[in-house]
Image (cartoon, rainbow, N blue to C red):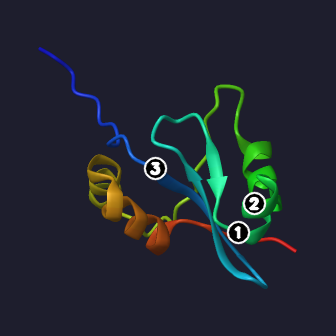
């Protein structure tokens, strides 16, 4: 019997949303799982920002970022979001993911 592993499709995906005076910023992981980017003005200008620094400090020694979601999210919703990826994943993260507020 072959075991099936659920993995997300290979496409860029949001890791963390941030709310600050400039609005909402999103740190995204590239499809190849090798590069983080942010859509804020500081990152576009300097290729680094406080959002990216915040995410990088929370990545564990295996390179895994702990995504925090609400307990209201059902297992079925989570499986669908991570299995289908794309807009399903983004909608799930916006609905149930933790939004951080940085000063």
Q: Considering the numbered disc 1 on the image, is that residue within a helix, a strand or a loop? A: loop
Instruction: Specify whether 21 is left or right of 77.
Output: right
Instruction: Specify whether 9 is left or right of 26.
Output: left
Q: Residue at x 11, y 14 (%)?
A: 1
Mark 1 nearby-residue class (10 Å; few <14, some 14–19, many ≥20):
many
Question: What's the distance in space between the residues labelled 2 and 1, CA to CA?
Answer: 6 Å
Q: Residue 58 falls in which quadrant of the image?
A: top right
Instruction: Specify whether 82 is left or right of 26.
Output: left
The number of discs equals 3
Q: Could you tell me if the residues under marks 2 and 1 are in contact, i.e. CB atoms within 8 Å?
A: yes
Question: What's the distance in space between the residues labelled 1 and 3, CA to CA?
Answer: 16 Å
Residue 100, position in %: x, y?
A: 70, 69
Check the image and name the residue furthest to the left.
Answer: 1
Disc 2: which residue: 43
25 or 89: which is nearer to us?
Answer: 25
Q: Which mark is residue 53?
A: none
Q: Is 22 above or below relative to 86? A: below
Q: Which mark is residue 40?
A: 1
Residue 23, position in %: x, y?
A: 69, 83
Q: Residue at x 28, y 47 (%)?
A: 83
Q: Considering the numbered disc 3 on the image, is that residue within a helix, a strand or a loop? A: loop
Question: What's the distance in space between the residues labelled 3 and 2, CA to CA?
Answer: 17 Å
53 or 1: which is nearer to us?
Answer: 53
Disc 3: which residue: 12
Q: Residue 39 falls in which quadrant of the image?
A: bottom right
Select label 3 or label 2 by which is in front: 2
Mark 2 nearby-residue class (10 Å; few <14, some 14–19, many ≥20):
some
Q: Residue at x 47, y 65 (%)?
A: 93
């Amino acid at each position: 019997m072959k075991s099936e592993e659920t993995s997300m499709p290979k496409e860029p995906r949001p890791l963390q949303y941030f709310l600050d005076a400039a609005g909402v910023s999103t740190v995204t992981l590239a499809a190849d799982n090798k590069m983080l980017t942010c859509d804020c003005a500081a990152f576009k200008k300097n290729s680094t920002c406080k959002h990216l620094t915040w995410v990088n400090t929370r990545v564990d020694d295996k390179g895994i970022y702990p995504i925090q979601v609400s307990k209201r999210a059902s297992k079925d919703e989570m499986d669908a979001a991570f299995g289908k990826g794309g807009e399903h994943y983004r909608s799930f993260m916006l609905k149930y993911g933790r939004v951080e507020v940085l000063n």
